[in-house]
Amino acid sequence: MKEYIKKIDGGVTAAKGFKAAAHAAGIKYKGRDDMALIFSDAPCVTAGTFTTNNVKAAPVIWDMQVIRNGAGCRAVVVNSGIANAATGKAGMEICEKTAEAMSSLYGGSRDGVLVASTGVIGMQIDAGRITAGCGELYKKLSDSREAGEAAARAIMTTDTHKKESAVELTLSGGSTVRIGAMTKGSGMIHPNMCTMLGFVTTDADIDRTLLQKALTSVVDDTFNMISVDGDTSTNDTYVVLANSLAGNPRIETEEEDYERFREALFVVSEDLAKQMAGDGEGATSLFECRVCGARSVTDAKQLSKSVIGSSLCKAAIFGHDSNFGRFLCALGYSGVSFDPEQVDIWYESAAGKMHIVHNGMGTGYDEEEATRLLSEDKITVLVDMHMGEAEATAWGCDLSYDYVKINADYRS
C-alpha cells in the first residue's frame, strides 16, 4: 500500500458529511435490523456498477436510471430479507414509494434517492413497512462509528459478520480525503459482479465521469475476481457517492490525484472483496489462487478464476486434501492454452509454504505436512505458468456441507 494511503477504522460514516442508520422494519426478518440508510449532508456525484444477469431486480433498474440521469444523490435506502426481484410492476412501484418517502423527509427529489434490496427472489415487499421504515431511519441518522456498523449489520442476509473498510488518502497538494464502505455478500457470488450490495462514501471532489471510470477499473480486479458458488445474482450493486466536502482541488483530469484516488478505492474494494470471499456460505477458509508467469493479464485472470471456481478444488480445500490433480485439471479447462509440463504449483498458508508440482508432476512432498498447510483459515495456491510476465489473483472459499444446508432451506 502506498505511503499516501492509510487504512483507518471505519465504514460508511468515515468520510465527512455522511451519516447512517439502521432499523427493524419487519420486512421479512423478525427481531433484527433489516433496513439501513446512508445519507449525505450535500448532494453527491454518483457512479455504479451492476449485475450482468439478464434478470435484474427492480432496485437495480431504478439505480441505473438514477445514476444515468446524474441527479445529485443524497440518500441510499437498503432492505434485507426480500430481494424485490421477479416482482414486475409492483417491484418498481416499491422503489418509487421508497424514494418518495425518503426524499420527502429532507425536502429533495426522489431522483436523488438510490434503493437497494437483498434476500429472497420472487417475494413482494410490504410498501407500508418500508415507507414507515424510511421515517424511522431518518430520525436515527448519525455520523457515529456505531451508526455505520449498525447499517453494515442491517444489510446482512446469510453473512456471518459485517463487512466494512475505510482509508484516508493524502492528495498531491496535501488535501486529505476519506473513503469508507460497507458490503454484504455470502452466497450467489460469481465473477462479473456477484450477489453483493456495496456502498462507498467519499468526501472527495471528483468529476462524475472520472469517478465512474475509477470504479469500473477497480471492480474488474477486485469483485470480478471472486467466486463462492458460480451463481451471478439479480441484485448486484456497487455504488460510490462523492459529496465534495473534503474541499480538495477538484479531480478533473487523469493525472496524479486521480491515480491516487483510484488506488485508494482499489484498496477498499479489494479488502471488501476478500472479506466476502472468506465469508462464503458455509465456508471455513478463504481460498486464494495467484497465477504468475502467464502470457497476458487476461490469461492470468482466466486461469486463477478457473481454480477458485472449481467445486472439486473447493471441496479439496475443505477436506485439507492435497489433491493437486484437481488444480491442474481446473487450469487445463480454463480455456487458456499452455504446456502442462512447464507448470509449477505451491501451497502457502500461515503454516508455511510447500512446492507441490514441478514441471507438471508431483514433487514427492510430505502428505501430512501438506495437510497441515491446508488446514489454515486462509489458503493460497501459487501457480507459475512459465510463459510470460503477467499475473493475477482470484479469491474464493472452500465448499462445505453447510453450503448445501444453508441453501436447501434459504426461504425459511
Image: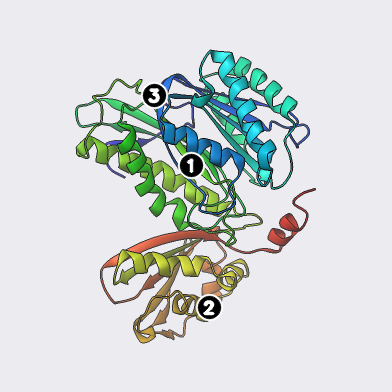
Residue nearest the observer in this picture, 318 or 152: 152
Q: Quadrant of residue 94?
A: top right
Which residue is disc 3 drawn over? Answer: 243
- Residue at x 58%, y 15% (from the top left corner): 104
In this picture, residue 412 sits left or right of residue 86: right
Q: Provide the secondary structure element on which disc 1 rests.
A: strand
Answer few, some or many: residues within 10 Å of disc 3's Cα (few below 14, many 20 plus, some between 14 and 19): many
The residue type indicated by label 2 comes to: Arg
The quarter of the image holding the N terminus is top left
Which residue is disc 1 drawn over? Answer: 238
Q: Is residue 22 above or below residue 285?
A: above
- Find residue 281 and report its horizontal and vertical position in percent: 64, 54
Which residue is disc 2 drawn over? Answer: 326
Whether pointer 2 and pointer 1 mark residues with C-beta atoms closer than 8 Å, the reply is: no
Q: Is residue 13 above or below residue 68?
A: above
The residue type indicated by label 1 comes to: Tyr
**Tag in front: 2 or 1:** 1
Q: Is residue 307 above or below residue 47?
A: below
- Find residue 162 and report its horizontal and vertical position in percent: 58, 39
Residue 292 in view, yes or no: yes
- Residue at x 51%, y 36% (from the top left corner): 63
The residue type indicated by label 3 comes to: Asn
- Find residue 403 and report its horizontal and vertical position in percent: 68, 59
Give the Cα separation between the discs numbered 3 and 2: 48 Å
